[in-house]
Amino acid sequence: DDVKPAPTQCVGPLYRSESQKPTAVVSTGVEFETVTILPQTPQLIALLSIIRNKDTQRGDFIFYSNRIIRLLVEEGLNHLPTVEHTVTTPVGRPYDGLSFQGKICGVSIMRAGEAMEQGLRECCRSVRIGKILIQRDEESSQPKLFYDKLPEDIADRWVLLLDPMLATGGSAIMAVDVLKSRGVPEERILFLNVLASPKGIQNFATKFPKLRLVTAFVDQGLDEKNYIIPGLGDFGDRYYTI
Ligand code: PRP
Ligand code: URA
């Protein structure tokens, strides 16, 4: 069966005993070391509960999705290289810290991935952003590539690939194939994702064993129309049109 049982866990800070914490369904675990799942904190679970709710209206869906996206971007940036960097503080003392190294760009898988661009811009002010338009056929669930426009020097950059939904994995795999055909090595691509299915993770991580994926949550499975379950419905529709 492709639908995993829901793992339930006490959620809350370490200093509280289990009996003081409420339980909630948390992310399914995965066996790939290239996949990072955000810590299942009370904030994240509460934010996800809002965007999963079918009664949540568009304004709140946008606001709370944006908060999750911001968490993903902050975690994603931790996977980029840094170098040692010492600065002098206003009181004349040195501080041995770090600075970022390397050029980056974002690439969104349109349409839903564009919802993640603002969160990336909030952290990386003038970041360049490329676009790949891939649409999943509603009947067959097969992805179709319509368009791409990417920075000229993308092969010299770290690429943050943006798509909130990873269902069968078909769309994300097609997007990575486009990036690789432009000379971006797999190990310099970081895929940021809100909600994944176990099958999508399996397909994607097996195909690209050097590519890092950061997700907020791995759900139980897919339904007969290849929608993620329990899921949140159609992310693009809820963010842009419903
Ligand atoms: C959704 C989603 C992903 C894809 C995931 O996009 O944003 O791109 O489906 O499904 P998959 O893993 O099975 O390929 P959709 O094609 O519905 O377009 P949209 O972004 O315009 O909503
Ligand atoms: N795309 C979505 O927006 N939601 C799903 O559950 C699957 C694909």
Image: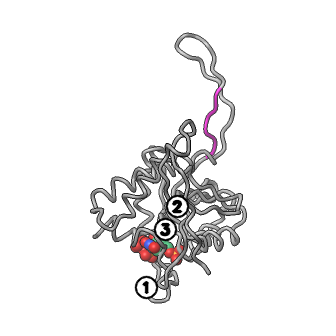
Q: Compare marks 1 and 3 and give the one earlier in the sequence.
A: 1
Across the whole image, how many numbered discs are drawn on residues?
A: 3
User: What secondary structure is found at the residue carrying circle 2?
Assistant: strand
- The three-letter code of the residue at mark 3 reads Met
Number of residues whose C-alpha sits closer than 10 Å to that of mark 2, classed few (under 14), some (14–19) or many (20 or more): many
Question: Quick check: is the Cβ at mark 3 less than 8 Å away from ligand 1?
Answer: yes
- Residue 59 in the image, given as x and y percentages of width and height: 27, 58
In the rendered view, does 84 fall on the left or right side of 191?
Answer: right
Q: Is residue 123 above or below residue 31?
A: above
Q: Which mark is residue 138?
A: 1
Residue 133 shows in this picture:
no
At 61% across and 59% down in the image, what residue appears? 213
Q: Quadrant of the N terminus?
A: bottom right
Magenta range is 97-102
- Residue 90 in the image, given as x and y percentages of width and height: 52, 14
At 57% across and 47% down in the image, what residue appears? 77
**Residue picked out by circle 2:** 193
Distance between the Cα atoms at labels 1 and 2?
A: 21 Å
Distance between the Cα atoms at labels 3 and 2?
A: 6 Å
Q: Which mark is residue 165?
A: 3
User: What secondary structure is found at the residue carrying circle 3?
Assistant: strand
Question: Quick check: is the Cβ at mark 1 less than 8 Å away from ligand 1?
Answer: yes
**Main secondary structure along the magenta-highlighted residues:** strand
Q: Are marks 3 and 2 in contact (CB under 8 Å)?
A: yes
- The three-letter code of the residue at mark 1 reads Glu
Q: Quadrant of residue 93?
A: top right
* Visual colour scheme: one colour
- The three-letter code of the residue at mark 2 reads Asn
Number of residues whose C-alpha sits closer than 10 Å to that of mark 3, classed few (under 14), some (14–19) or many (20 or more): many
